């Protein structure tokens, strides 16, 4: 029986150049570090950083993220978020051996990394060039798509005003026979939904999460979290949430 590929998704760490900086009243470094022991227990084969690694887009924040995540998984991949600066993070992550894709082959699955970040804008967008990797997917083989911005409403008004704009451009390219799930960050909460027969799953933040359904960001006291996936080569999969507690 084939063993599943364990993939860990970490999102919205919001590290700053100053490791003592506060983010929504929380310390980003301390909260990420508190989550890592539980993440290691999952023994992830692959790790995807799904954006907003840094709050201030500083080189120091990306360097420190790399040190904290060193050895967590055999392979690490990343996409930028709206708080990141790709021109700053790419050289750091390239040197660390982190992969930008946009297509990876992990555990018999096609892993797609889509960059939805728009400079100086909180909302996201995917133009034709950024959607092009979807045209390279091999039909009949399972695929998991990662994007930073939510491609559908998560029913939290404070963050739903900053979505992936024109999401129909993405959905028109996705075939449920191939794409099993779209995974995203940005929303600072765990969300599970479905669109056109494709699962839609968010990873919560590693620093501060909001209470679902809130009009304004209201801190969830249960602490930092991440999402995990178990991927079998035949297309079966499971997903859940890991927390520091």
Image (cartoon, grey):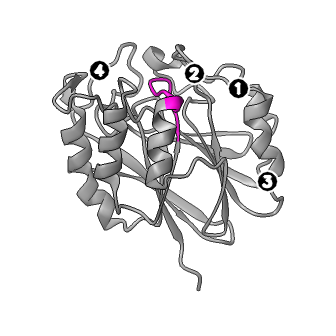
The answer to the question of whether label 1 and label 2 lie on touching residues, with beta carbons closer than 8 A, is yes
State the CA–CA distance, disc 4 to disc 1: 26 Å
Under circle 4, the secondary element is loop
For residue 163, the mark is 2
* Pointer 3 or 4: first along the chain: 3
Asked if residue 107 is positioned above or below residue 147 in the image, the reply reads below
Q: Does residue 82 belong to the magenta stretch?
A: yes
For label 1, the crowd category at 10 Å Cα-Cα, with few meaning under 14, some 14 to 19 and many 20 or more, is some
Looking at this view, name the residue that lies furthest to the bottom.
Answer: 1
State the CA–CA distance, disc 3 to disc 4: 39 Å
Disc 4: which residue: 218
* Pointer 3 or 2: first along the chain: 3
For the image, the number of numbered tags is: 4
* Pointer 3 or 1: first along the chain: 3
Residue name at image x 58 percent, y 26 percent: 117
Image coordinates for residue 118, horizontal then vertical, percent: 59, 20
* Pointer 4 or 1: first along the chain: 1
- Does residue 174 appear in the picture of this structure? no
For residue 167, the mark is 1
Q: Does residue 81 belong to the magenta stretch?
A: yes
For label 2, the crowd category at 10 Å Cα-Cα, with few meaning under 14, some 14 to 19 and many 20 or more, is many
Under circle 2, the secondary element is loop
Residue name at image x 63 percent, y 30 percent: 151
Instruction: Decide which of 60, 32 is in the foreground and name it.
Output: 60
The answer to the question of whether label 2 and label 4 lie on touching residues, with beta carbons closer than 8 A, is no
Please provide the residue range marked out in magenta. 79-87
Disc 3: which residue: 137
Asked if residue 153 is positioned above or below residue 34 in the image, the reply reads above
């Amino acid at each position: 029986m084939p063993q599943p590929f364990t993939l860990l998704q970490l999102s919205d760490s919001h590290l700053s150049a100053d490791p003592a900086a506060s983010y929504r009243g929380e310390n980003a470094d301390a909260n990420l570090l508190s989550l890592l022991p539980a993440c290691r227990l999952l023994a992830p084969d692959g790790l995807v950083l799904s954006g907003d690694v840094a709050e201030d887009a500083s080189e120091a924040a990306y360097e420190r993220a790399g040190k904290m995540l060193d050895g967590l998984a055999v392979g690490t991949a990343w996409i930028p978020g709206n708080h990141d600066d790709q021109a700053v993070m790419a050289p750091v992550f390239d040197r660390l051996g982190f992969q930008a894709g946009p297509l990876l082959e992990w555990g018999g699955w096609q892993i797609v990394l889509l960059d939805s970040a728009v400079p100086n804008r909180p909302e996201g967008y995917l133009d034709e060039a950024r959607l092009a990797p979807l045209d390279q997917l091999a039909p009949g083989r399972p695929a998991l798509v990662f994007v930073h911005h939510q491609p559908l409403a998560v029913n939290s008004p404070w963050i739903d005003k900053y979505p992936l704009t024109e999401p129909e451009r993405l959905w028109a390219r996705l075939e449920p026979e191939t794409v099993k799930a779209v995974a995203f960050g940005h929303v600072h909460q765990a969300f599970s939904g479905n669109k056109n027969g494709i699962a839609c799953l968010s990873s919560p933040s590693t620093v501060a999460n909001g209470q679902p359904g809130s009009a304004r960001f209201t801190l969830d006291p249960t602490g930092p979290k991440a999402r995990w996936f178990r991927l079998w080569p035949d297309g079966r999969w499971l997903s859940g949430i890991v927390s520091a507690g």
